[in-house]
Image: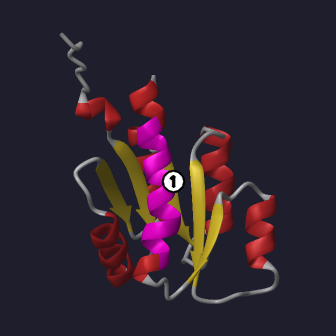
Amino acid sequence: MSPIIYVDLKHNVVSVVIIDDNPRSLEFLSTALSRPDVQIFTATKPEDGLALVSLHRPQIVMTDLMMPGMTGLEVLQRVKQFDPAIEVIVMSARESGGSPAKALQQGAADYLQKPIALSVLRQRVGSRIQNHIAQRVKS
C-alpha cells in the first residue's frame, strides 16, 4: 500500500502584491496571473501596497516604477527592509536613466518593460510563482 500524501493547499498558496497607479494595469496583471494557488492583492497607491505587504507577507511584489508619491525604487527599498526574502519585480513603461540596472542593483528580482506581453508575464512571473509553490511542497 502506498502512503497517502496530504497537501494542505492553504499553506501552498503563493501571495502576490501588485502596486500600480493604473487600474487597467492592475486588472490585466491580476487576471493574467490568477490561478487557484495564487492569492493576489492589488493597490493603486504605494502606501496602500506597502500596508498589504506588511499584512500579508507575500512572496512576490510587483511594482510600477513611476507612481505619484513614491517611486517603485522606493517601494523596492522598503519591501527589502521589511523582508529581504520577498522577490520584487519592477515594471515601467519608460526606460528612464538606467532604471532597469538601478532596480536590479538595489535588489529587484526582475525588471519588466511595459506593455508586458502576456506570454512574457506568465513565463517570467509564472516561473517565480511555480518555484515558490515547489519549495512549499518540499517543506
- Residue 130 location (% of width, % of height): 43, 49
Q: Residue at x 28, y 62 (%)?
A: 34
- Residue 106 location (% of width, % of height): 77, 58
Magenta stretch in the rendered image:
120-134
Check disc 1: other Cα within 10 Å, few if <14, some if 14-19, many if 20+.
Answer: some
The residue sitting at the front extreme is 1
- Residue 95 location (% of width, % of height): 70, 87
Q: Secondary structure at mark 1?
A: helix
120 or 28, nearer to the observer: 120
135 or 42, nearer to the observer: 135
Within the magenta stretch, is there residue 55? no
User: Which residue is tagged 1?
Assistant: 128
Quick one: quadrant of the N terminus?
top left
Please say if 13 is above or below 121.
above
33 or 130, nearer to the observer: 130
Q: Main secondary structure of the magenta part?
A: helix
Asked which quadrant contains residue 29, the reply is: bottom left
Asked which quadrant contains residue 122, the reply is: bottom left
Within the magenta stretch, is there residue 133? yes
Please say if 111 is above or below 109.
below
